[in-house]
Image: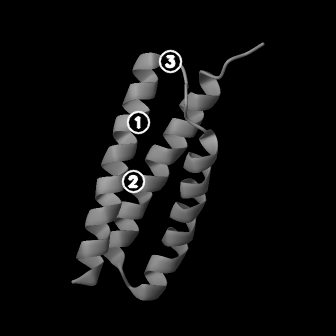
Amino acid sequence: MYDFINASFEFGLAFILYLNMRRLRIDRTIKGVSWYSTGFTSLWAVWNLLYYPYLEQWVSFVAGFGVLFMNSWWLYLAYQFRERD
């Protein structure tokens, strides 16, 4: 049961990160957002992918891939659209 509750938060986060990524693709610029927060949550997602199997939380494990994928995609786009001097 706890696995499903945790996974619902992970899936919800992945969806919100998708919205961030989609907005970045439309705007093609980053204003008022630091890549540090996305980078940190990416590291957290990697940790979760290592930790969830230990807890045998397989639904959360799958949802964790969504979080890592969306964060990685956002970071890639942020790199592509960074302001250059």
Q: Position of residue 17 (x, y in %)?
A: 40, 44
Question: In the displayed structure, would residue 21 be above or below residue 68?
Answer: above
Residue beneath label 1, please? 20
Quarter holding residue 64: bottom left
For marks 2 and 1, the one nearer the N-term is: 1
Horizontal side of residue 18 vs 78, given as left or right: left
Residue beneath label 2, please? 66
In the depicted view, which residue is nearer to us: 23 or 55? 23
User: In terms of secondary structure, where does tag 2 sit?
Assistant: helix
**Closer to us: mark 2 or mark 1?**
1
Horizontal side of residue 66 vs 32, given as left or right: left
Q: Position of residue 37 (x, y in %)?
A: 57, 49
Residue beneath label 3, please? 28
**Closer to us: mark 3 or mark 2?**
3
Amino acid type at image mark 3: Arg
The outermost residue toward the front is 32
